[in-house]
Image (spheres, rainbow, N blue to C red):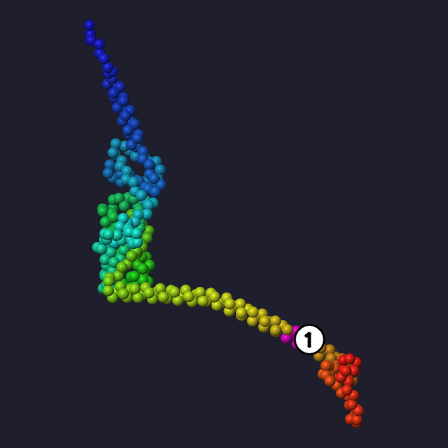
Amino acid sequence: MRPVKHGFSLSPKIIIVALIIALLVGAAASSFFVVDQTEQAVVLRLGKYNRTVGPGLQTKIPFGIDSVYIVPTQVVQTLTFGYRANDKTGTGLKGASSYKSESTMLTGDLNIVDVEWIVQYKINDPKNWLFNVENRETTIRDISQSVMNALVGDLPILSVMTNLRTQIEIEAQQNMQEIFDRYNFGIQIVTVKLQNIVPPEGDVQDAFEDVNKAIQDMNRLINEGKEHYNQEIPAAQGEASKLILQAQGYAAERVNTATGDAARFDALREAYEESKEITSNRLYIETMDEILTDKEITLVDKNLSQFLPIKNLGGTK
């Protein structure tokens, strides 16, 4: 009798089929990758650049033939100079540790100043970003420091600390972008922003504080002048409008009076031309009536012998 075999045995054919299925499943699983909305992917085939793809579900050749590098092209990245973000304290940007080698600069008038700033950038060409430059962050820092040192070194310290800050930021951004474009760095500078600018202790710091105080006083006086202007001008304008209206009313009254007098004299002239004697007598009587109204009157005859006071005659004269 033959011994009975226990257990389950697979035939070589089944094993081969299972291996093929596993291989196909693994190939299918490694043939797809997902790119986020804020990213782009660079695909290398056998170590050589093949293509750049955008967001969505993408495919590649498995088994290590294609390799994929994801690059965040829509994310604004920030580099700080003279401090680091994790050094922030409750009241300022600089904490216990600082980076003097980045921020200490010599101005055009040979003063030492501590300048802190940030550079924000986006990757706009993933291929150039990955393959054209090594040590990318270090290179960005070196170029940014070189540009900022050159700009600050051409200006006096008070200009750096006061009225030319914006100009420095604009020129620094332009100069950095020109250098990065020249070397096909694959980035776009979004902004360059100066932060703290600290003068050296001594006469320069005292002078800077005096300048700041003068600027504050100037702004205060300007604001007070604007406030006074806003109070006085409306009142003056209202008074001027009132006087103008009064003058216009007075002018209209005088014109109307003159027009009425002219019309009355024209009527008298016409009446006088038609009947000179009657008109003369009427004008005489009207004039005497105006003159003698409410006056004490005494009648005297031509011989001056009889006097007749008629003050109360008739109750009115």
The x and y percentages for residue 303 are: 79, 94
The x and y percentages for residue 223 are: 41, 64
Residue lying farthest to the top in this orientation:
1
Write down the quadrant of residue 215 in the picture: bottom left
Residue topped by disc 1:
260
Residue at left 59%, top 71%? 246
Q: How many marks?
A: 1
Direction from residue 84 to residue 290 in the image, left or right: right
Secondary element at image label 1 = helix
| Residue 130 among magenta residues | no
For the magenta stretch, what is the residue range?
Answer: 254-258
The x and y percentages for residue 267 are: 73, 78
Q: Residues within 10 Å of mark 1 (few under 14, many from 20)?
A: few
Seen in the picture, residue 269 relative to 131 is either above or below; the reply is: below
Main SS category, magenta section: helix
Q: Quadrant of the N terminus?
A: top left
Q: Quadrant of the C terminus?
A: bottom right
Residue at left 61%, top 73%? 250
Direction from residue 58 to residue 296 in the image, left or right: right
The x and y percentages for residue 79 are: 28, 50
Write down the quadrant of residue 107 in the picture: bottom left
Please tell me which residue lies in front, 303 or 18.
303
Identity, as a three-letter code, of the amino acid under mark 1:
Gly
Please tell me which residue lies in front, 255 or 303.
303
Please tell me which residue lies in front, 111 or 134.
111
Seen in the picture, residue 31 relative to 171 is either above or below; the reply is: above
| Residue 7 visible in the snapshot | yes
| Residue 179 visible in the snapshot | no
Residue at left 32%, top 41%? 40
Residue at left 80%, top 91%? 306
